[in-house]
């Protein structure tokens, strides 16, 4: 009887440890509650999601009924940016033109939470670089509007979650 009791206690401890490990890994490496709510594929290679918005109230009307940090630089374009994975951090830098390259200038903020960004004076040269960090890897993204068709410019790390107006392609 004592052997069975010891076995049950050991099995119980192992189960608790496994549940704790699963909980920690899921909270550190899983997708954010925002990505879950938008039904973004949990196995996507994309690290952040971005959207062109018309106003801050667009976020509440189309995405989430919460207030988010608002970062503003020179410009009139508005974007909603959010991490897809919980272990993604975004450093937001102003960008300047140096010779023929756009380079990071001043750090505005560092966050792992969704935010609204107002930027881009020019349609051709973005004035923001978002440094996307996941684990030991670093990627860059400059939100901007495509001159080709007016859609959101994305790269291989960014999911476009912009709402399309009915009748728009």
Image (cartoon, rainbow, N blue to C red):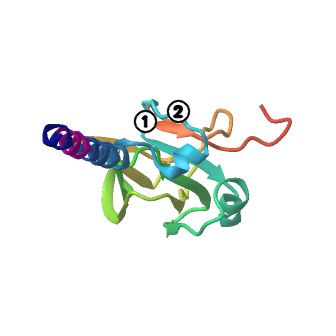
Closest to the observer: 36 or 10? Answer: 10
Q: Residue at x 45, y 35 (%)?
A: 46
Look at the image and give the residue range highlighted in magenta.
7-14
Residue pushed farthest right? 167
Closest to the observer: 21 or 143? Answer: 21
Mark-to-mark CA distance, 2 and 1: 14 Å
**Mark 1 residue crowding within 10 angstroms, few (<14) / some (14–19) / many (20+):** some
**Mark 2 residue crowding within 10 angstroms, few (<14) / some (14–19) / many (20+):** few
- Lateral position of residue 160 relative to residue 85, left or right: right
Give the residue pinned by disc 1. 157
**How far across and down, in percent of the image, does residue 104 sit?**
32, 54
The dominant secondary structure in magenta is: helix
Residue pushed farthest front? 1
**How far across and down, in percent of the image, does residue 30 sit?**
40, 42
- Secondary element type, mark 2: loop
- Secondary element type, mark 1: loop
Give the mark toward the camera: 2 or 1.
Answer: 2
**How far across and down, in percent of the image, does residue 20 sit?**
29, 48
- Lateral position of residue 92 relative to residue 72, left or right: left
Q: Residue at x 32, y 42 (%)?
A: 22
| Rendered position, 53 above or below 73 | above
Q: Residue at x 32, y 64 (%)?
A: 107
**How far across and down, in percent of the image, does residue 114 sit?**
49, 58
Nearer the N terminus, badge 2 or badge 1? 2
Give the residue pinned by disc 2. 41
Closest to the observer: 152 or 113? Answer: 113
Closest to the observer: 63 or 15? Answer: 15
């Amino acid at each position: 009887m004592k052997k069975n009791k010891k076995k049950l206690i050991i099995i119980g401890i192992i189960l608790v440890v496994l549940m704790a490990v699963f909980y920690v890994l899921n909270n550190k490496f899983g997708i954010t509650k925002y990505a879950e709510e938008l039904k973004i594929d949990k196995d996507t290679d994309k690290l952040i999601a971005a959207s062109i918005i018309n106003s801050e109230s667009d976020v509440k009307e189309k995405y989430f009924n919460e207030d988010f940090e608002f970062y503003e630089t020179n410009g009139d374009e508005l974007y909603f940016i959010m991490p897809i994975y919980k272990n993604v951090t975004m450093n937001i830098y102003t960008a300047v033109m140096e010779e023929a390259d756009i380079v990071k200038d001043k750090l505005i903020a560092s966050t792992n939470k969704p935010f609204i960004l107002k930027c881009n004076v020019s349609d051709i040269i973005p004035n923001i670089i978002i440094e996307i960090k996941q684990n030991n890897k670093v990627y860059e993204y400059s939100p901007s509007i495509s001159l080709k068709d007016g859609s959101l410019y994305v790269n291989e790390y960014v999911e476009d979650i912009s709402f399309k107006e009915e009748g728009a392609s």
